[in-house]
Image (tube, rainbow, N blue to C red):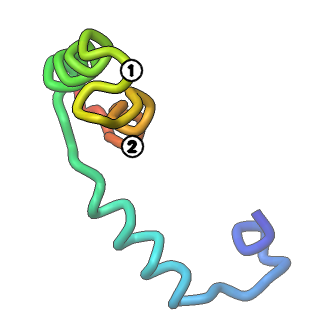
Amino acid sequence: MRVVDGAAPADAEVGRFLADALAAVPRLTRDQFEKLFGDSIQAGPGARGRPTARRSPRHLIVCS
């Protein structure tokens, strides 16, 4: 907020990092997200040797 408010100078390196991070997030339709999330829930904890939370789609962007 400090940069947005003008209280701190912008940092191009931080801005590029954030832009690159957001560009790397897969974009899904609502239907794709719901299927992925539903499949993840149905697999249950420990499926494929990993906890469900690690496979949850919290890191995805849903596009309408």
**Side of 46 where 1 appears, left or right:** right
Give the residue pinned by disc 1. 45
Most extreme residue toward the front is 49
Within 10 angstroms of label 1, few (less than 14), some, or many (20 or more) residues?
some
Q: Which residue is mark 2?
A: 59
At 21% across and 43% down in the image, what residue appears? 27
Residue drawn at x 55%, y 82% is: 14
Image coordinates for residue 33, horizontal then vertical, percent: 23, 25
Left or right placement of residue 41 versus residue 17 in this view: left
**Placement of the C terminus among the 4 image quadrants:** top left
Q: Residue at x 29, y 63 (%)?
A: 23
Q: Earlier in the sequence, mark 1 or mark 2?
A: 1
Q: In what quadrant of the picture does the N terminus appear?
A: bottom right
Callout in the foreground (1, 2): 1
Q: Position of residue 10 (x, y in %)?
A: 65, 85
Quadrant assignment, res 37:
top left
Q: Position of residue 31 (x, y in %)?
A: 15, 17
- The amino acid type of the residue labelled 2 equals His
Q: Is residue 53 left or right of residue 24?
A: right
Q: CA distance from mark 1 to mark 2?
A: 18 Å
